[in-house]
């Protein structure tokens, strides 16, 4: 069952959409689609805190804060074709539950508006509403993310904000690149790469299965990142750069996933769908 970026494929019927489809399908071609502690120095934002430990401890710091608002963007590029998917919502990091409204691109002429897709993120699962592909508008599609070869890092068109932070537990080669303002907040910019297998081993129990799937499914085991951490040790922005083989090693698809965090600590309510509201039929496959 194709999901996520493949949703773009199913909602574009012209020649230009076919070019987008090649990019989106490539991103999900194989899908039917040390543990970071956070010491006082890292959390307190001391200038001389160890960059690697600051970055690795960011996920735990996020969970302690409890919740936030999140904005996501995912850009896929292959050759001269680019597709960008945007999302916005909230996340309860202690419960591991989030809700995003994901907006698909307009068609090539810019005059076709697509209904936002509501995504519910839960430990081990992704729920989607307004999925299209023959799914009734009042029903949800449920996907076991541990069965996806990318662990749902890109399949849903948005990287789960908690998983985006959990990835940093596998941070390597971290360097500090100075201070930067992110939405008016002073942050320190860190750059490095994630070793997916290390991130999977160090991840919290609820996220381990998805990251273990990604560690096995990605052709490249390391993912470059940029992360921006404020003086309280909270992530304000993280960018991951994934790479997929499009059936041919020389034609990789580049996927840049960006997550912005703000509005920390506000009450968040995410209600998962009842069993009777989950679609039990077959979801149409994305077109060529």
Image: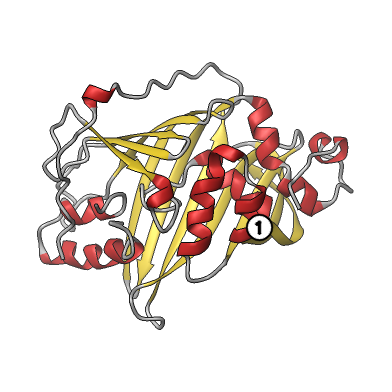
Q: Position of residue 35 (x, y in %)?
A: 73, 47
Q: Which residue is more in the foreground, 83 or 123?
A: 123
Q: Which residue is more in the foreground, 35 or 66?
A: 35
Q: Residue at 15% x, 38% y: name it.
A: 135
Name the quarter where the C terminus is drawn: bottom left
Count the marks: how many?
1
Rendering quarter of residue 203: top right
Q: Position of residue 198 (x, y in %)?
A: 66, 57
User: Relative to 281, is 256 above or below?
Assistant: below
Q: Position of residue 60 (x, y in %)?
A: 69, 36
Q: Residue at 10% x, 61% y: name it.
A: 14
Q: Position of residue 259 (x, y in %)?
A: 51, 44
Where disc 1 sits, the SS reads: helix
User: Relative to 136, is 214 above or below?
Assistant: below
Q: Is residue 50 left or right of residue 193?
A: right
Q: Crowding near pointer 1: few (<14 within 10 Å), some, many (20+)?
A: many
Residue for badge 1: 198
Q: Is residue 43 left or right of residue 113?
A: right
Q: Is residue 96 left or right of residue 168?
A: left
Rendering quarter of residue 6: bottom left
Q: Residue at 56% x, 67% y: name it.
A: 221
Rendering colour mode: secondary structure
Q: Is residue 166 left or right of residue 11?
A: right
Q: Residue at 21% x, 35% y: name it.
A: 130
């Amino acid at each position: 069952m194709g999901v996520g970026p493949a949703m773009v494929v199913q909602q574009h019927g012209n020649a230009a959409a076919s070019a987008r489809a090649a990019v989106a399908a490539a991103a999900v071609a194989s899908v039917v689609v040390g543990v970071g502690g956070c010491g006082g120095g890292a959390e307190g934002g001391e200038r001389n805190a160890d960059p690697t430990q600051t970055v690795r401890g960011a996920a735990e710091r996020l969970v302690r804060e409890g919740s936030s608002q999140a904005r996501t963007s995912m850009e896929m590029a292959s050759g001269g074709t680019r597709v960008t998917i945007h999302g916005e919502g909230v996340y309860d990091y202690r419960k591991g539950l989030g809700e995003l409204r994901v907006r698909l691109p307009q068609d090539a002429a810019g005059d076709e508006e697509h209904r936002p897709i509501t995504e519910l993120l839960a430990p081990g699962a992704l729920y989607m509403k307004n999925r299209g592909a023959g799914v009734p508008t009042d029903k949800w599609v449920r996907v076991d993310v541990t069965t996806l070869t990318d662990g749902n890092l890109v399949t849903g068109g948005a990287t789960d904000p908690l998983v985006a932070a959990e990835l940093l537990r596998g941070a390597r080669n971290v360097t500090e690149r100075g201070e930067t303002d992110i939405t008016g907040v002073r942050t320190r910019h860190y750059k490095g790469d994630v070793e997916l297998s290390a991130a999977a081993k160090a991840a919290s129990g609820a996220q381990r299965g998805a990251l273990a799937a990604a560690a096995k499914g990605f052709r490249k085991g390391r993912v470059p990142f940029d992360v921006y951490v404020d003086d309280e040790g909270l992530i304000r922005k993280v960018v991951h750069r994934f790479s997929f083989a499009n059936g041919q090693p020389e034609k990789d698809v580049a996927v840049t996933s960006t997550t912005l965090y703000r509005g920390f600590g506000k009450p968040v309510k995410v209600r998962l769908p009842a069993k009777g509201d989950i679609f039990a039929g077959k979801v149409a496959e994305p077109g060529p």
